[in-house]
Amino acid sequence: MVRKLDQEAAGYAAPEGKGFSMKFSRDVISVLRIPQWSKNLLVFLPALITHAFDREALTAAALAFVAFCLTASATYIFNDINDRESDRTHDRKRHRVFADNQMEPRTGYALIFVLLAAAGFLAAQLPLEFGFVLLFYIGSSVAYTLLFKRMLGIDVVVIACLYVLRVIAGDEAIGAQFDGIDSSGWILGFSCLFFLSLALVKRCSELAVLRAQTGANMAGRSYRVEDYPVLLALAAASAMASMAILMRYIGSADVAENFSRPQVLWLIVPLLVYWLVRVILLANRGQITEDPVIFTLRDSKSQICTVATVLVTLAAW
């Protein structure tokens, strides 16, 4: 009883039964950032491109997806622990579990260990090359948190590369290695520029919010409010360059060989151009305050574009 009173006097409450378990579960779900797992669907792209729809390939891709989800969550937790001080000064990020002192860092590190152990077990079921890509992803993510995120320009390049690593990992998981696909360079080029554009949009949206609110610079970043128009221009340039590569890919001999109606795929171009232009303009207005991928999941017009793109791909099949 005395110990409990001492804890309450110090500002801590002893965990009690079911209420504590439910809160801890909510905190764990929060730090996992499950909505971000949608990014890992990129590991299925090589299977789609190579038409590897046999049971073995799809099982391998599914294992790779789960392994990447667990690994990504581990890196998100590490990032949140490392950034908890700067997050406390951010209008939205201050509500994150570690910034809000809802979970101790040592608990976070325990979760990281469990997540990586589970991801390692799944990776062991896949080709060794997939494991190497996964390790490189972990190393790049840690380096981003500790170093690259504070380096002007390099941060967005690293973010784009982390997206591309998901595509490469999916390729290694099914052992396709883009065999027989002459346009593999176009696919990776499109991914690099497309996701570079999204990384730049994310920075632009953050700067737009700061410009409208306080005019201050970004905490924990090297960008200044005056960098905003340059970043926006780079985002638009990267987006349109990725569309040029996509059009080259649609016109390639490989697409003609693998799709019965390849000309239908051209409808994807205006859909993606519309979506990219809309996202860039909304970021310019400060109306995107989160990761563009998460924005897409919540935005009705983005959802329509996604569904339409899937339907066009099926129609071309």
Image (cartoon, rainbow, N blue to C red):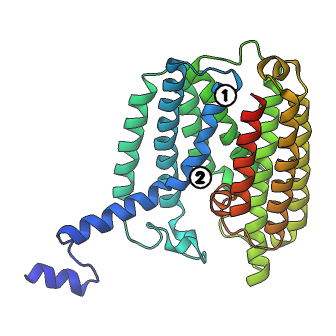
Q: In percent of the image, x 77 and y 39: which residue is there? A: 312
How far across and down, in percent of the image, does residue 154 sit?
A: 76, 49
Q: Amino acid at mark 2?
A: Thr
Quarter of the figure that contains the N terminus = bottom left
Q: Is residue 171 above or below residue 32?
A: above
Residue 127 visible in the snapshot: no
How far across and down, in percent of the image, does residue 257 sit?
A: 81, 16
Label 2 element class: helix
Callout 2–callout 1 Cβ contact below 8 Å: no
Residue 48 tag number: 1
Q: Nearer the viewer, mark 2 or mark 1?
A: 1
Give the image quarter of residue 45: top right
Q: Is residue 126 above or below residue 143?
A: above
Q: Is residue 198 above or below residue 230?
A: above
In this picture, residue 93 sits left or right of residue 307: left
Q: Is residue 205 above or below residue 193?
A: below
In space, the residues marked 2 and 1 are separated at their CA atoms by: 32 Å
Label 1 element class: helix
Q: Which badge, 2 or 1, comes first in the chain's sequence?
A: 1
In this picture, residue 282 sits left or right of residue 176: right
**Residue at the left extreme?**
1
Mark 2 = which residue? 145
The one nearer the camera, 74 or 182, is: 182
Q: In percent of the image, x 58 and y 77: which residue is there? A: 89
Q: In percent of the image, x 56 and y 46: which residue is there? A: 142
How far across and down, in percent of the image, does residue 97 sit?
A: 44, 67
The one nearer the camera, 58 or 237, is: 58
Quarter of the figure that contains the C terminus = top right
Residue 123 tag number: none
Q: In percent of the image, x 91 and y 50: which residue is there? A: 237
**Residue at the top extreme?**
180
How many numbered marks are there? Answer: 2
